[in-house]
Image (spheres, helix red, strand yellow):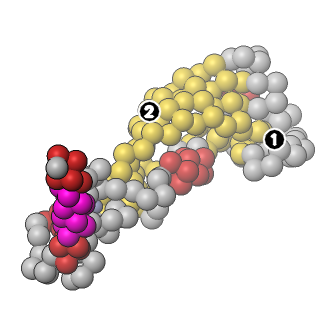
Amino acid sequence: MEINVSQQLKAPIGAIRNYDVDEAVEIAGSASRVQGKVRLTRTHRSILVKGTLHTETEVTCSRCLSLFAYPLTLNIEEEYFPTTDVVTGASLPLTDEPGCFTIDEHHILDLTEAIQQYVLLAIPMKPLCRQDCAGLCPNCGHNLNLGPCHCPPQQTDHRWSELNKLAFISDMKRWKETE
Ligand SMILES: [Zn+2]
Ligand SMILES: [Zn+2]
């Protein structure tokens, strides 16, 4: 996603340009549509990019292991430093900002890498295809979102017996109190 900023680099500090973004960006090996708005501001040393972009990427549900499209909102805020003086064409010294982005010698500002980094940060550690995803049967691996499997419900039995025990104890207590 490339923006030519040669005009803006010549503009006075504080000059603003707004862009509507609607492009395909390679995210996790496949082209994803990225939409939104960014605002570019000329600063004394760089072009500051701020904006909100929307896209989606395919992730694996941490419970049922199915692939699903996960919507992402990216709040981008990055400074892009010129590497070439837009007027003289002379090379500019690189800034010592760690991990900063640069504008190439043709005055092209490329948002692709920033978008890819923000996507990685926005994907949750344990995505769920839906909040109440039923997951897989620990016994046969059947996807329980598609309905129950034929395994004997051992875990459920166990839990019920615990509950029955508790109910029995509280019944006993009540019985003793009333006596
Ligand atoms: Zn799931
Ligand atoms: Zn099962």
Image side of residue 127 versus residue 146, left or right: right
x, y percentage for residue 49? 63, 32
Q: Which residue is mark 1?
A: 84
Hey, which quadrant is residue 146 in on the image? bottom left
- 153 shown above or below 135: below
Image side of residue 124 versus residue 95, left or right: left
Residue 166 falls within the magenta-colored stretch: yes
**Residue located 53% across and 54% down the image:** 120
Mark drawn on residue 163: none
Mark closest to the chain's N terminus, 2 or 1 = 2
Q: Nearer the viewer, residue 8 or 57?
A: 57
Q: Which residues are magenta?
A: 160-172
- 142 shown above or below 76: below
**Residue located 72% across and 24% down the image:** 42
Q: Which residue is mark 2?
A: 36
Asked whether the residues under the numbered discs 2 and 1 touch, taking CB atoms below 8 Å apart as contact, a structural biologist would say no
Image side of residue 117 versus residue 68, left or right: right
Residue 41 falls within the magenta-colored stretch: no
Residue 58 in view (yes/no): no
Say which element carries label 1. Answer: loop
Say which element carries label 2. Answer: strand
Q: Nearer the viewer, residue 139 or 52?
A: 139
Q: Residues within 10 Å of mark 1 (few under 14, many from 20)?
A: some
Instruction: Please tell me whether mark 2 or mark 1 is closer to you in this view.
Output: 2
x, y percentage for residue 83? 80, 43
Q: Is mark 2 within 8 Å of ligand 1?
A: no
x, y percentage for residue 64? 29, 67
